[in-house]
Structure formats: structure tokens, C-alpha cells
Amino acid sequence: MKVAIETMVHMLFLCAGCILLVQIVGSNLYILQARTCFHKLADQIECSQSDEAVIAECKKEAENCGYRLECERMDVPQGDSCVLLSLYYELKVPVIGKSQEEEKREGVIQGYAR
């Protein structure tokens, strides 16, 4: 009887661990998608040499993907154009102990388009 109870407890811990790992992998995949989108948008802005129309189009594209893109022009002594890009995304984290509730956290990816 003791072995059966220990086996059941081990299986419960194993199932809880598997669920936790699936959540971690899912979150990492979502962040990877955001990074891919960020690099694509940064490349478009760099290739256009920081054109305002391209920046506006990139902001629309980021919104269509579920992200928010903010651009800030930076002053560079050499006279080159430099734009600080910030891509904001929402990361949903399930709350343990509360049924069907999720805590939303905002992540940000920042980089420069020169």
C-alpha cells in the first residue's frame, strides 16, 4: 500500500513538472516570435535610412502582430541617423491557485536602427 501511495505522489509531481515546463516553453516561443518581428522591423527601418513613412508602416505591422513599436530619434555626432526602437509585448503568466486567471506582464525588446 505504501508503494502505491508513493507512486501516486511521484506521478502527481511529474505531471505538475510537465505542465510547468510546457508553460515555460510556450512563453519562450512567444518571446522568440517577438524578437523575430523586432529584427525584421529594425532591418526594414535600417534599409530605408529611417524614413518616416516606413516607420509608420512598421508601427502598423507591429500592431497587426499584437505588439507595440515605439521609435525615438537619437542625436549622433557623426550626422548619421539613429533610431532607438522599443517593441513591447504582453506575456501571459497563469496564476497558480486562481481558476482561469492570468497575470499579464509586459516585456520589451530594445535596439538601434542605424
Image: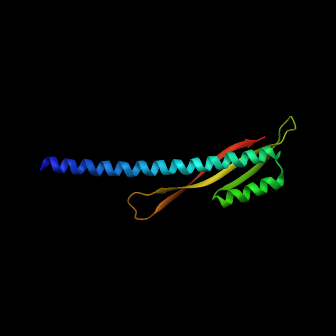
* Residue depicted at 77% across the width and 57% down the height: 57
Residue farthest toward the bottom in the current orientation of the protein: 100
Number of residue marks: 0
* Residue depicted at 87% across the width and 38% down the height: 79
Q: Is residue 48 above or below residue 56?
A: above
Q: Position of residue 1 (x, y in %)?
A: 12, 50
Residue farthest toward the top in the current orientation of the protein: 78
Residue farthest toward the right in the current orientation of the protein: 79
* Residue depicted at 40% across the width and 62% down the height: 98
Q: Is residue 95 above or below residue 48?
A: below
Q: Position of residue 89 (x, y in %)?
A: 61, 54
Q: Position of residue 95 (x, y in %)?
A: 43, 58
Q: Position of residue 13 (x, y in %)?
A: 30, 49
* Residue depicted at 43% across the width and 65% down the height: 100
The quarter of the image holding the C terminus is top right
Coloring basis for residues: rainbow
